[in-house]
Image: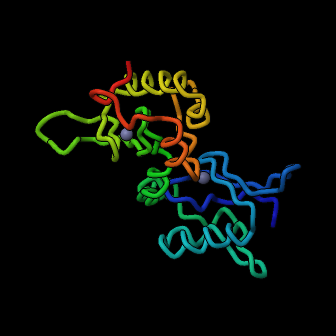
Amino acid sequence: MADKPMRCPTPVCTGWISFVKDEDGDFWGCGECGEVWFEQDDLNDAIKEIISTYEYRKPCYQKSGKNWVAAPLKKEPEDYEELVENEDYPDDDDEEEELGFYCCPTWGCFGMVVWCDDGGNPEEDDSGWYCDHCGDSWPTNEKFFKQIAKIIKRGPHRTALYEQTDEGWQPLGEPDDWERVVTKNEEPLKEEGGELF
Ligand SMILES: [Zn+2]
Ligand SMILES: [Zn+2]
């Protein structure tokens, strides 16, 4: 690929991608949105998709062999950045689901907790963290994170589920045999009111 900077093929991003040599594997990356591509094929696919979605993106790229490379900058439409900024955000439902899911921090429960904007009653502000299994809920991050801190103290097998960051506890995913681990370590299923202590 040419060394010339190339427009990032990510929707809404007006950044540039460049080729980065790295010990762990070279890649193409965008400094603006943070997207990376380790395989040229993946980058080609991303470009193919964006130019088939948005006509004005086409002049930014040209084919070199089977790969897409940067076209001369003067071909780019003058209002390129404005057009791109008005694009739709990518459909990232899958990503949100994956990122937002916590193993439920209620003792004896192996359900998953996710943030809901309203708990089924749009008349009231009953947004919060809800468990799909035991039905417990926490109206604020603060309460939810407190509960996570508590359950980690109570059961060391819980430690690997969450990671403490500047923005509070982040989920690290659900272990494969999570239901078995909980059932084995955490009888009885539920305490009074579902609350600890
Ligand atoms: Zn980008
Ligand atoms: Zn639960």
Give the side of residue 59 with respect to residue 103, left or right: right
Q: Residue at x 30, y 34 (%)?
A: 137
Q: Quadrant of the C terminus?
A: top left
Which percent across, then down, holds residue 33? Answer: 59, 48
**In front: 26, or 160?**
160
Q: Where is residue 52 in the image (x, y as percent from the top left)?
A: 51, 76
Going by the image, does 121 lie left or right of 83? left
Image quarter hosting the N terminus: bottom right
Q: Can you give x and y, in whole percent of width and height, for residue 85 in the image?
A: 46, 53
Q: Residue furthest top?
A: 197
Task: Say which of 128 and 26 sits in front.
Answer: 128
Q: Residue at x 71, y 78 (%)?
A: 63
Q: Observer-nearest residue: 158 or 169?
A: 158
Asked if residue 197 is positioned above or below residue 27 in the image, the reply reads above
Most extreme residue toward the left is 123
The image's colouring method is rainbow
Outermost residue toward the bottom in this view: 65
Q: In which quarter of the image is ligand 2?
A: top left
Looking at the picture, does residue 30 appear above or below residue 127?
below
**Quarter holding residue 134:** top left
* 94 over 39 or under it: above or below: above
Which residue: 53% across, 48% down?
180
Q: Is residue 37 left or right of residue 174?
A: right
Which residue is drawn at the image coordinates 61% and 68% (left, top)? 46
Question: Is 115 rendered above or below residue 66?
Answer: above
